[in-house]
Image (cartoon, rainbow, N blue to C red):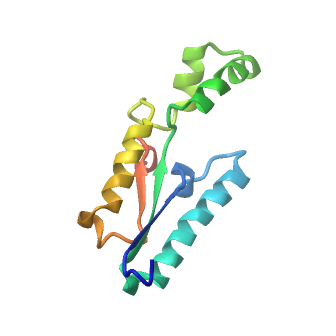
Amino acid sequence: MKSRGWGRIISTASAHSLVGSPYKSAYVAAKHGIAGLTKAVALEVATNGITVNCISPGYVWTPLVESQIPDTMKARNMTKEQVINDVLLAAQPTKQFVTPEEVAAVAIFLCSDAAKQMTGANISVDGGWTAA
């Protein structure tokens, strides 16, 4: 990237790179680490035409998230709707899952010339989770 004078580095963090949650200390620490690494590397390569950013989504509706619902239902004695609304989407004011396409659209933008002055940013795609 340095030899070409152009590059885009995009990491995926999480809303937990910006806020904490109880009982998730290792996960929160790891995501904060991604955010810090993003800032440090952005500064290191700022004069080389390389941008470094991270995207921090809230809960994204994926097969992995969907597969966790039955275990959570059993562990907490909840219905599927209760798990979705009262556990997974509790922190997201929109009460909607982020879609993979929404995250991808931000990544595509960050790769464009329109984002060439965006570096070291942590971009929330979290339904308002980190606005509070």
Left or right: where does residue 41 sit relative to residue 77?
Answer: left
Residue pictured at 41% horizontal, 36% vertical:
93
Image quadrant for the N terminus?
bottom left
Is 115 positioned to the left or the right of 77 in the image?
A: left
> Which residue is most to the left?
114
Q: How many badges with numbers are in the image?
A: 0
The percent position of residue 35, horizontal first and vertical second, equals 54, 65
Q: Is residue 32 left or right of residue 98?
A: right
Residue 120 percent location from the top left of the image: 43, 71
The location of residue 105, given as percent across then percent down, is 34, 47
Q: Residue at x 52, y 24 (%)?
A: 85
Q: In this view, does 51 lie above or below 126?
A: below
The residue positioned 54% from the left and 55% from the top of the image is 13
Residue found at x 39% / y 54%:
107
For the residue pair 31 and 5, the one nearer the viewer reads as 5
Foreground residue among 82 and 112:
112
Q: Report the residue that reaches farthest toward the front.
A: 4
- State whether residue 79 is above or below residue 84: above
In-front residue for pair 43/75: 43
